[in-house]
Image: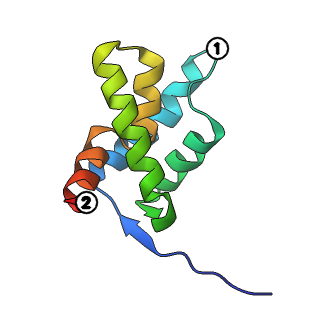
């Protein structure tokens, strides 16, 4: 058996809070927001880290969703955005990318 260690990246504390709140709030909806990928990401973020291979997915999702939320805000979309770390993680990744 081969052991693979993924590099992990620390994240802003607000992003951790956002992810925890999203996992809690999604249960208030009959048709729960967030895909399985979003739930996986949120659970990973609650640990305080994310795997390096998810960075592009997180950035891409947040860029699209935040823009859509500004044009047409919905509660479900906001829960999904928070599950992926919210604006705090988006701004962190944006600065990191340069």
Q: Where does residue 21 sit, x and y in percent of width and height?
A: 43, 35
Residue 64 or 84: which is nearer the viewer? 64
Q: CA distance from mark 2 to mark 1?
A: 37 Å
Quadrant position of residue 5: bottom right
Q: Which residue is mark 2?
A: 97
| Whole-percent x, y for residue 56 in the image | 43, 55
Q: Is residue 5 visible?
A: yes
Question: What crowding class fits label 2: few (fewer than 14 Cα within 10 Å), some (14-19), or many (20 or more)?
Answer: few
Is 94 situated above or below 66?
Answer: below
Which residue is found at the position 53% from the left and 49% from the top?
41
Residue in view at x 48 percent, y 19 percent: 76
Q: Which residue is mark 1?
A: 30
Task: Point out the tag, 2 or 1, that comes first from the N-terminus.
Answer: 1
Q: Residues within 10 Å of mark 1 (few under 14, many from 20)?
A: few
Relative to 48, residue 14 above or below: above
Q: Quadrant of residue 71?
A: top left
Q: Are marks 2 and 1 in contact (CB under 8 Å)?
A: no
Residue 36 relative to residue 1: left or right:
left
Q: Is residue 68 above or below residue 11?
A: above
Location of residue 50 by image quarter: bottom left
Q: Secondary structure at mark 1?
A: loop
Mark drawn on residue 71: none
Residue 46 seen in this snapshot: no
On-image quarter of the N terminus: bottom right
Q: Which residue is rendered at x = 23% and y = 61% of the image?
A: 96
Q: Residue at x 31, y 48 (%)?
A: 89
Closest to the camera, between mark 2 and mark 1, is 2
Percent coordinates x, y for residue 2 in the rendering: 74, 87
Q: Nearer the viewer, residue 2 or 71?
A: 71
Q: How many marks?
A: 2
Mark 2, secondary structure of its residue: helix
Find residue 98 and report its horizontal and vertical position in percent: 19, 59
């Amino acid at each position: 058996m081969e052991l693979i260690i993924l590099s992990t990246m620390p994240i802003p504390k607000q992003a951790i809070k956002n992810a925890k709140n999203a996992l809690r709030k999604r249960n208030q909806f009959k048709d729960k927001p967030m895909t399985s990928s979003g739930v996986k990401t949120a659970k990973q973020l609650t640990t305080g880290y994310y795997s390096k291979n998810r960075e592009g997915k997180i950035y891409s999702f947040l860029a699209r969703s935040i823009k859509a939320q500004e044009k047409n805000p919905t509660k479900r979309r906001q829960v999904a955005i928070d599950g992926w770390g919210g604006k705090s993680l988006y701004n962190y990744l944006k600065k990191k990318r340069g």
